[in-house]
Amino acid sequence: MNRIKISGSKGMVLSTVLLGVNLLAGAQDKPNIIWLMAEDISTDIECYGMQAVKTPHLDQLAEDGIKFTNAFCTNSICSPSRSAMLTGVFQSKINAQHHRSNREIYLPEPYEPFTKVLRENGYTCILGNNNVLNKGRKIDANFKHTDLGEWDGKENVGLFDKYDEFTKGDQPFFAQIQLQVTHRGDWWNEIRAQSHKPVNPGDVALPPYMADHPDVRLDWAKYLDQIEYMDSEVGAIIQDLKNKGIYDNTVIIFIGDNGRCNIRGKGYLFDPGLRIPLIMSWPKGIKPSQVHDGLVSSIDITATILDLAGVPIPDFMDGKSFLSPDFSREYIYSSRDLWDEIMEKSRCITTRQYKYIRHDMAEVPYDAHQAYLEFYRPAVHIMRKLKWEEKLDSPQMHFFRSHKPEEELYDLAADPHELNNLAEDSSFRDILVKMRAQLKEAETEATGTTSDYVPVIPEAVEVYDWVKYMHRDAYLEMLDGKEIGSQKYVKLFYER
């Protein structure tokens, strides 16, 4: 049987994970694998040190398995990041780097989704689960696909076999379950209202680039309420596995698709946008209470799943199994391109100590007044007002400047909030030059052979302009920092 033999005592920090690999005796020996993908979440759960939030089920998963402290996504926006994870390939290599573009274009050869490989090797692939908000069926990939059906990459582009339910008869199975509640949505107020003990805004710890304002604190507390709800969904899934007697031989992988949806988070290449939680547990195969501090890319998850399943990793994959004894990464390459109506081109390299960001469109400000974010980021509105009143300090002002610097360099060890840009500091010149070269190398490796570009025009742009003029009271409430949500106004827009 394939067993992970990971050395280390309780709480020991591991720089590499050791895997003893044996040939599988048969399908009955293969583990089930569940991939829990939380939306728009950075390392903002209790076991990672986030203040004021309670996440007992995720904390227990970490205690029972491995917590990864240096996991990063390849793009800070959902659909490019997911496209990369579904294939194990950098999104730019398959021309999937622009948010929700190219949805009618087939994946170029030889690339294919990893679920096809799993199904060819005896796995039932399941999408979603009845225990989570909206059934957790979201895929959001930037290439032509359908939820269910066969895959040949031409006439048939199905990714999964069935929806929602896993049983003993499905074994071995792979299930991808989307934990959507943490994504900005009109349900946030309802979730908070239902909480028996909503997070106290006075207890939250804001980063220094956020203004300490009551409405900003409330918004952060609501985010943590969603995380607590999501944790309860994880608990329900685990209990379902135990009730069915299949928990012990089920690998559970918990990961974020990209960072938190707030200032410097989702959509940007700062740590809150790229650093994601990653926890893996398997009662029959992984020793408990381990912390892995080596660099891991989100595309490594794909190769690791195939490795767990005893399946050869295709040569086209950029991801590597982090269970391999020779696994290591010197740096993580990440990027940002189109997001809704805002075109961007930013690239970055993250090492254990440093972050280097290059902005090829520095004239596009961080605060680009993107329509979707106008509806769902109260902190932006509050801090714009404070800017006009000249009440923001330097770390808070960085996000609201008229343009971005062309280069940014941060010492993550000394400056974890990335407040001190060292790109023009002569004492860091050698590091800057080295990381420029690393970025060029990574870009070259991640360049694809096609340049198709068929974007989707987001409805939020029209709806936002309509609300601005036709629902003036709601618009003014938005400017005052109230999250009015978009779905109500989308419905009214189309009913008009």
Image (cartoon, rainbow, N blue to C red):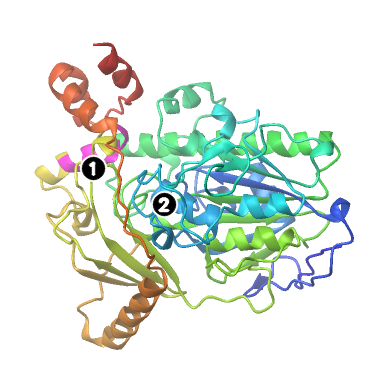
Q: Secondary structure at mark 1?
A: loop
Q: Quadrant of the N terminus?
A: bottom right
Residue 227 location, x and y as percent? Answer: 52, 39
Q: Is residue 476 visible?
A: no
Res. 341 mark: 1
Res. 80 mark: 2
Mark 1 residue crowding within 10 angstroms, few (<14) / some (14–19) / many (20+): some
Q: Amino acid at mark 2?
A: Pro
Label 1 with label 2: CB-CB less than 8 Å: no
**Is residue 233 rendered to the left or right of residue 10?**
left
- State the residue at coordinates (30%, 21%): 490
Residue 91 location, x and y as percent? Answer: 42, 58
- Residue toward you, 227 or 255: 255
Residue 195 magenta-drawn?
Answer: no
- State the residue at coordinates (69%, 33%): 236
Name which quarter of the figure residue 90 lies in: bottom left
Residue 34 location, x and y as percent? Answer: 68, 46
Q: Amino acid at mark 1?
A: Glu
**Is residue 210 rendered to the left or right of residue 126?**
left
- State the residue at coordinates (71%, 52%): 120
- State the residue at coordinates (18%, 22%): 466
Q: Which residues are magenta?
A: 375-384
